[in-house]
Image (cartoon, rainbow, N blue to C red):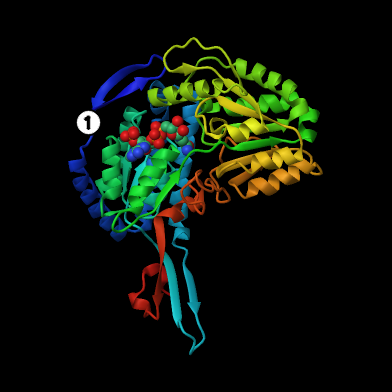
């Protein structure tokens, strides 16, 4: 059984929801497979209708849903209402894509007579049963009806979501609303199934031979465990895992002297948004040594204004406290923390400061700290900057601030482009636009496949594969390929 935990009081509340056992996984997958065959017969227009109806149903109940989720994740109703709007926007975006047939990627070539190939007709088809592991930090946009589910369904696949234990009641209600909407559009009731269960259930789902792909958002360790299991199957399958990221930011000398208070405020807001639990939070900031003291004082002043930020789950709360304590044990790392009442799963903002030698020597400084903490690294000169950036691993984003003719800027861009999926100039990395030009992924460990994005139109490409029909008569071709 799983029960909600209120992060503001660290107490369980609400009904006990049933978890499935590993023995039940086979039945769940079998139902999904049957649903997948039916979805294929119904076609994209019905799928698009189902996605639109699901969006309408979630919008119609957004006020109640946001309050329910707030009790479970304590992110605040306004933020959660915004997230529901993002979620329904994603559902409508994929509905539009599918209704226009853009996801099919139809490509037609009639090669010259005598050339190998002849008449080639290519399009994308769905992969099959997709398992989605919902994220803790986005109870809507990366959960039951989030981007992974929306893109996988839009591609024509049936979806099984393993709900996150951090918001089980929200997951349940969203599942009910979306299923009703899909059925009203004529889709099978098992097009989307939501299950509660622990690690063993998750692993069993990934191992099941009829599961064709996996979407995941969470820790690097979790993503890696699933990827390894998927790769060791008799028939390996892709796991699209969006994992941890520290999102380095470089503030070059020309930026820090020009507007340090503005820089510090902007950074603090980004670090604190979502109580520091965004995968795009700037977790390490490289600043010129001679301006560091003043900048850190400004940053602490801004961070001190936020008190009692409740973290999503007991596990995340424990991990945050352990990570901050570990930094505090290093003699060359200066750790400042704001104030907190300690109520429930609350923590205060944290700023840790060190120089480049310490950054290179202490792995704890380079690891993601999920929560309202950031690390400021004092950089003496451009050689120091290059040494530091060469130790940065794969990330979802990087951010650079500075004038175009600032040498630090050119060096930072050159180094960081190799390590990230998105580079931001002058702003902050939090706030990921759902757009066809977005790429939300990056070299390992930020994601398991740097080629793919979990946000924006291209997310659908993860759940389809191309097939070519060669020299087929028109009558035998799928409708989308006929003349
Ligand atoms: P998590 O621990 O990775 O869990 C996410 C999902 O994966 C859960 O359903 C979990 O199942 C499953 N899972 C994790 N490890 C597994 C394993 N070894 N075998 C099978 N299933 C496994 O993520 P979380 O609970 O959301 O937060 C923990 C940490 O993840 C955070 O501190 C943060 O570092 C990171 N995180 C990153 C992002 C991001 O956007 N990239 C988002 C959220 C969290 P169980 O619940 O059964 O364990």
Q: Is mark 1 within 8 Å of ligand 1?
A: no
User: How far across and how far down the image is residue 390, in percent?
Assistant: 64, 44
The residue at the point 23 percent across, 33 percent down is 19
Residue drawn 55% across and 12% down? 339
Q: Which residue is labeled 1 in the image?
A: 18
Q: In this view, does 279 lie to the left or right of 123?
A: right
Q: In which quarter of the image is residue 121?
A: bottom left
Residue 144, above or below 299: below
Where residue 64 appears, as percent x and y from the top left, is 38, 25
Q: In terms of image quarters, where does ligand 1 lie?
A: top left
Is 231 on the left or on the right of 399, as rendered?
A: left
37 lies left or right of 110 = left
> Which residue is at the front of the view, 299 or 70?
299
Give x and y (percent) for residue 191: 29, 48
The residue nearer to you, when weighing 187 against 360, is: 360
Local crowd size for mark 1, using a 10 Å CA cut-off: few (<14), some (14–19), many (≥20): few
Front residue of this view, candidates 398 and 115: 398
Find residue 354 and report its image quarter. Answer: top right
Residue 132 x %, y %: 36, 44
Q: Is residue 274 visible from the viewing direction of this image?
A: yes
**Is disc 1 placed on a helix, strand or loop?**
loop
**Is residue 84 in sight in this rendering?**
no
Q: Residue at x 30, y 18 (%)?
A: 13
């Amino acid at each position: 059984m799983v029960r909600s935990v209120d992060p503001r009081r660290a107490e369980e509340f609400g009904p006990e929801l049933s978890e499935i056992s590993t023995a039940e996984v086979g039945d769940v997958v079998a139902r999904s497979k049957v649903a997948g065959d039916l979805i294929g017969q119904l076609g994209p227009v019905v799928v698009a209708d189902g996605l639109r109806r699901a969006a309408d149903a979630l919008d119609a109940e957004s006020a109640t849903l946001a309050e329910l989720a707030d009790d479970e994740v304590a992110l605040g109703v306004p933020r959660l209402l915004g997230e529901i709007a993002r979620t329904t926007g994603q559902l409508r975006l994929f509905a539009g894509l599918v209704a226009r047939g853009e996801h099919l990627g139809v490509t037609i070539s009639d090669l010259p007579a005598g050339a190998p190939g002849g008449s080639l007709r290519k399009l994308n088809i769905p992969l099959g049963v997709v398992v989605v592991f919902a994220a803790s930090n986005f109870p809507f946009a990366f959960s039951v009806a989030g981007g992974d589910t929306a893109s996988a369904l839009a591609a024509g696949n049936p979806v099984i979501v393993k709900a996150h234990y951090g918001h089980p009641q929200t997951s349940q209600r969203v599942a009910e609303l979306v299923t009703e909407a899909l059925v009203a559009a004529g889709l099978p009731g098992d097009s989307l199934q939501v299950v509660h269960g622990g690690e063993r259930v998750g692993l069993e789902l990934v191992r099941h031979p009829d599961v064709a792909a996996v979407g995941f958002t969470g820790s690097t360790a979790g993503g890696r465990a699933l990827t390894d299991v998927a790769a060791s199957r008799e028939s390996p399958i892709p796991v699209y895992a969006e994992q941890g990221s520290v999102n380095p930011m470089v503030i070059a000398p020309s930026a820090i002297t020009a507007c340090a208070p503005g820089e510090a405020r902007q950074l603090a807001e980004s670090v604190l948004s979502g109580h520091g639990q965004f995968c795009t939070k700037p977790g390490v900031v490289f600043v010129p040594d001679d301006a560091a003291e003043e900048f850190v004082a400004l940053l602490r002043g801004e961070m001190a204004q936020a008190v009692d930020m409740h973290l999503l789950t007991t596990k995340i709360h424990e991990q945050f406290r352990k990570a901050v304590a570990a930094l505090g044990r290093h003699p060359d790392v200066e750790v400042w923390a704001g104030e907190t009442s300690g109520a429930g799963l609350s923590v205060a903002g944290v700023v840790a400061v060190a120089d480049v030698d310490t950054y290179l020597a202490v792995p704890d400084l380079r690891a993601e700290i999920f929560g309202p903490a950031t690390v400021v690294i004092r950089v003496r000169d451009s050689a120091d900057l290059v040494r530091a950036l060469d130790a940065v691993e794969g990330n979802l984003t990087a951010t650079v601030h500075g004038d175009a003719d600032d040498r630090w800027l050119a060096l930072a861009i050159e180094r960081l482009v190799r390590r990230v999926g998105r580079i931001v100039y002058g702003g902050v990395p939090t706030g990921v636009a759902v757009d066809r030009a977005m790429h939300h992924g990056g070299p390992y460990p930020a994601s398991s496949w740097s080629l793919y994005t979990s946000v924006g139109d291209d997310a659908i490409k993860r759940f389809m594969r191309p097939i070519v029909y060669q020299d087929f008569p028109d009558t035998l071709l799928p409708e989308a390929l006929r003349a």
